[in-house]
Amino acid sequence: MSSEEEVILTPEGFASLERELEELKTVKRKELASRIKTAISYGDLKENSEYHSAKDDQAFMETRILQIEKMLKRARIVKSEDASIVQVGSVVVLNDVELGEKIEYRVVGGAEANVAENKISYESPMGKALMGRSVGELIQVDAPMGIIEYELLEIKTV
């Protein structure tokens, strides 16, 4: 991601990043400062695994804070208001033609994609296949195991 590239977020994704940033800057920073202080009290820092672990965690956290701040600065918030076509923010109900199983996905920007929560990026193969499509259309997705065909049953706005 280039430093000038906009970050597409839903309103919920933007709010979630704001909450995470606040938690990291307030609660987590204090917790890590306390861990580091305690670890320093153990003495010899060269062989102090608690100290090194806490410093590693601190570096990771500070990197995440910078990452979130950059995303929020470059964020373009999009809200799906048209249920006639799939767009970022849409919730889609699909039928896997081969298996006859229904699945529901929310199409989001890459920064908030999370397969465990059925949030797929509009840039993913599935997301690209869905963008701009309408209810009743057959969608083909080129997956690692071959082409998967879905019927678009429903589009919802959130």
Image: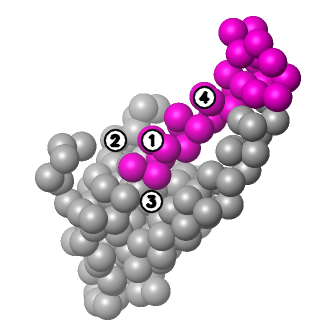
Name the residue type under label 4. Asp
Q: Main secondary structure of the magenta part?
A: helix
Of 122 and 155, nearer the camera is 122
Q: Which mark is residue 99?
A: none
Q: Residue at x 14, y 52 (%)?
A: 4
- Could you say where residue 97 lies in the image, as x and y percent from the top left? 49, 58
Q: Which residues are magenta?
A: 40-66
Q: Which residue is mark 1?
A: 63
Contact flag, marks 3 and 4 (Cβ < 8 Å): no
Magenta stretch encompasses residue 65? yes
Label 4 belongs to which residue?
56
In the visual, does 43 lie left or right of 9?
right
Q: Residue 63 at what x, y percent from top left?
A: 45, 41
Report the number of discs. 4
Side of 50 where 89 appears, left or right: left
Residue bearing the label numbered 2: 142
Counting residues from the start of the chain, the first of labels 3 and 4 encountered is 4
Relative vertical location of residue 13 with respect to residue 62 in this rendering, above or below: below
Q: Secondary structure under badge 2?
A: strand
Local secondary structure at mark 4: helix
Q: Earlier in the sequence, mark 1 or mark 4?
A: 4
Viewer-nearest of discs 3 and 1: 1
Which mark is nearer the camera, 3 or 4?
A: 4
> Identity of the amino acid at label 1?
Thr
Question: Relative to 130, is 30 on the left or the right?
Answer: right
Callout 4 crowding tier (Cα within 10 Å): few <14, some 14–19, many ≥20? few
Mark 3 — residue? 112
Measuring from the top left, give residue 21's x and y in whole percent. Answer: 51, 62
Secondary structure at numbered mark 1:
helix
